[in-house]
Amino acid sequence: MQVLDKTQVEAVSKALGEPGWLLEKRLKALEAFARLPYPSKKDENWRYTDLSEAPLEQEIETPKGLRLSRDQLPEPVRRRLERTDVSGFLVFVGPDLVYAEVPEELRQKGLVFTSLAEALKTHPEKVQSALFQGVYTEDKFAAENSAFFTHGAFLYVPAGLEVEKPLGVFKVLLEGGKASAGRSLLFLEDNAKAAYIEEYLSLDLPPTLHLSATEMVLRPGARLRHAHVQTFGEGVWHFHRQRALLERDSGLNDLVVNLGGAYARSEVASELLGPGSESEMLGLYFGHGRQQFDHYTLQHHTEHHTRSDLLYKGAVKDEARAVFSGLIKLEKGAQKTDAYQANRNLLLSPTARVDSIPQLEIGANDVRCTHGSTTAPVDEMQLFYLQSRGLPRGLAQELLVKAHLADVLSRIPLKALRAHIEAIIEEKVRI
């Protein structure tokens, strides 16, 4: 097994043809990675998670230079393209950008949508001004991603441009046994508007480590709809960290969906840095078998007259587990803040479990903040009522799950994506 060391960092950077400043940032991240321990149950934010079976020390996969035509794309991607309404998209197979379609009319208006490696060559100043602002060395996994990431997407929307249809990135794992590390950088200038969907797919694989990071920089008045949808097959351990930096009057509608893999952890933060900024944070998860989904969220208000609204809802059955830990944090200057946080969970079997910890940390005194959490089993009376009307128990349970998740699904403004998520949930209920 190859050691995760300086030699490997330098090899990745050289293979991608990166500038010296980026190699220097990678090496600093490597120092943090070497210094920081892997988390354990002794750490407060990891006390519900057992990483003893996680493939933590895997060698990082390296780019092979693979390119494909649209007809040669992996079947899971071709199926998704038949049912999605994205106007432009990138497809990564492992560490390689194998295919891209971006409307020429958007390019002519100044939009940049390509791989990070390509953007470093064509728009180096834009990448350098924003990369690592949101995710760098916050913990062991963030540092590992920052040091070893081999691929990723870059989206730049110039000032005033409104992209009507969503843009998409499909990341597919076809081979297991090696770690995959990628990141996305989304940069919207003043009053720009866009929707961005990142989907993660695979078939069942041997134990495989997947690291992803998404950084979002929203300049004054920018508006972004973002979705992170993970439907990995069995065997994948997925660690995702994202952070949005929202300046004055900017807005984010964010959705995190965890449905696949052996384990998935999403750490999602909205930094409300300017007056008038607002963030809507939505989450959906459904676990079966022995899956575990962990969600750690931060609504960080640093300025006055900001607003955030979080709603995470999920269901677990069999021996699946879920964790939600959410923090609303207000600095002293965050007066006139409105902040809401809710987590709702449905238990579909007596052996499923959810741990939910909503939290407030308020440094201002003229604010409105609320939080709440509920976890409960399926209502047997509701099941009995539906069955008494002739529905089989399985179908009755499916209807109750869909009703439980409906208020999150109804807040997803991307219709094709909402239909895709609903179809996967229906399938999981029937397993």
Image: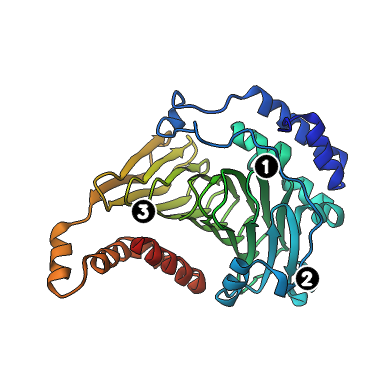
Q: Secondary structure at mark 3?
A: strand
Give the position of the C terminus as an image quadrant. Answer: bottom left
Report which quarter residue 18 is drawn in: top right
* Residue 112 visible from this viewpoint: no
Q: Are marks 1 and 3 in contact (CB under 8 Å)?
A: no
Figure check: 91 above or below 375:
below
- Residue in front for this viewpoint, 408 or 148: 148
Disc 3 to disc 2, C-alpha distance = 39 Å
Report which quarter residue 250 is drawn in: bottom right
Residue at label 2? 107
Residue under the image location 71 percent in, 41 percent down? 60
x and y percent of residue 346 in the render?
Answer: 29, 52
Mark with earlier residue (1, 3): 1
Figure check: 133 above or below 253:
above
Q: Amino acid at mark 1?
A: Gln
Horizontal side, residue 155 vs residue 83: left or right: right
Figure check: 111 above or below 93:
below
Mark 2, other Cα within 10 Å: few <14 / some 14–19 / many ≥20 = few
Q: Secondary structure at mark 1?
A: loop
Instruction: Tell me, for residue 133, which label it has, or none.
Output: 1
* Residue 277 visible from this viewpoint: yes
Q: Amino acid at mark 3?
A: Gly
- Residue in front for this viewpoint, 53 or 152: 53
Report which quarter residue 156 is drawn in: bottom right
x and y percent of residue 123 in the render?
Answer: 83, 55
Residue at label 3? 314
